[in-house]
Image (tube, rainbow, N blue to C red):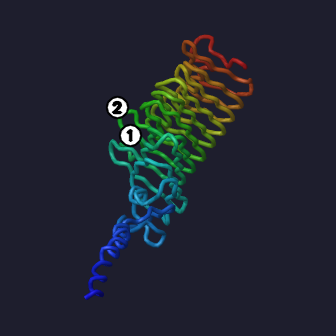
Amino acid sequence: MGQAIRKIALLPAVIALALPLLAASPAQAQATRTWVSGTGDNTKNCSRTTPCQTFSGALAKTAPGGEINCLDPGDFGTVNITFSVTISCEAGTAGILVTEGAAGITINAATTDVVTLRGLDIDGQGSGVAGIQILSAKAVHIEKTAIRNFRSGSTAATGITTTPLGSVTIFLFIADTVISDNDYGIRLRSGGGFKVASLKNVAITGSTQDGLELAGGNNIYANVTGSIILGNGDRAVVVDSGSTANIERSMLANNGVALVTDGIIRISGNNIYNNTAAIAIGPGGKLQSDGTNKHGNSNGGAQVPNASFAEY
């Protein structure tokens, strides 16, 4: 009888020790690296041997600061990013086909988060509103990516845009990327905070409106190096009051107007040719050149009286 009593007394202690293990067993830790495949399955764990099918499926199983990779080509769907992550896909076409009125990638992360997008092919199919729209993040890196066919009629569909929501400072780095056949190529807007963009080896072509637009707020800065802004229907580069663009060693050709500024544009070592007009300078606008730019445009250079390539 004494042994039976002792066994019964031990039961609560055994149960208490087992409860934490039972409670923890259903949970699954998020992975620092996940995978997607054109033949994947979002019910899987997104490992290399059992990849997911979409970026959104993989993102749900990726730890903050982790990375999503592609095993093979595929259409991996639109995705909303809310934390630091890298999506890196250079194994074939990492496609995102965007439906009417939608965005390919939306970034609404914390102001301490860094997002990197590499090797993507984002297609608006003639009716999407944005390839990549950035609401909030510390920094966004876009590399070796193609963004095209974002056109939506009366709406300003855009390849890459920062939205004027909240007082957020964002650093945007774009390299080795082609942005083509959209309503607008890149639109940088701000409702507060700084928006600072760096473009290196970027091609912006075939926009029905502007190639690069710094509009809708103060403290917007763009630094353009070794890039091509070509064949855009309205302006190649337009800078609103309170904003600044620095453009060097780039080609601005066959646009409606090459440079339009109510803010500050500084140019160095560029080729500015075959635009309908070279320059339009508004009240308070400044265009500064170091004298190393080459230009020849259909109206002889300037769109406004006395506009010229003023030297530093």
Give residue 131's position: percent from left, percent from top: 44, 44
In the rendered structure, which amino acid carries the disc numbered 1?
Val
The residue drawn where x is 65% and y is 16% is: 308
Asked whether the viewer can see residue 134, the reply is: yes
For residue 129, the mark is: 1
| Residue 26 vertical placement versus 153 (above, below) | below
| Residue 284 vertical placement versus 205 (above, below) | above
- Secondary structure of the residue carrying tag 1 is loop
Residue at mark 2 to residue at mark 1: CA–CA distance: 11 Å
In the rendered structure, which amino acid carries the disc numbered 2?
Ser
In which quadrant of the rendered image does the N terminus lie?
bottom left
Give residue 209's position: percent from left, percent from top: 46, 31
Of residue 4 and residue 22, the one placed in the foreground of this image is 4
Disc 2 crowd, CA 10 A, few/some/many (<14, 14-19, 20+): few
Q: Is residue 51 left or right of residue 229?
A: left
The residue drawn where x is 33% and y is 42% is: 101
Name the residue carrying label 2.
Answer: 154
The residue drawn where x is 45% and y is 44% is: 109
Asked whether the viewer can see residue 300, the reply is: no
- Secondary structure of the residue carrying tag 2 is loop
* Mark earlier in primary sequence (2, 1): 1
For residue 70, the mark is: none
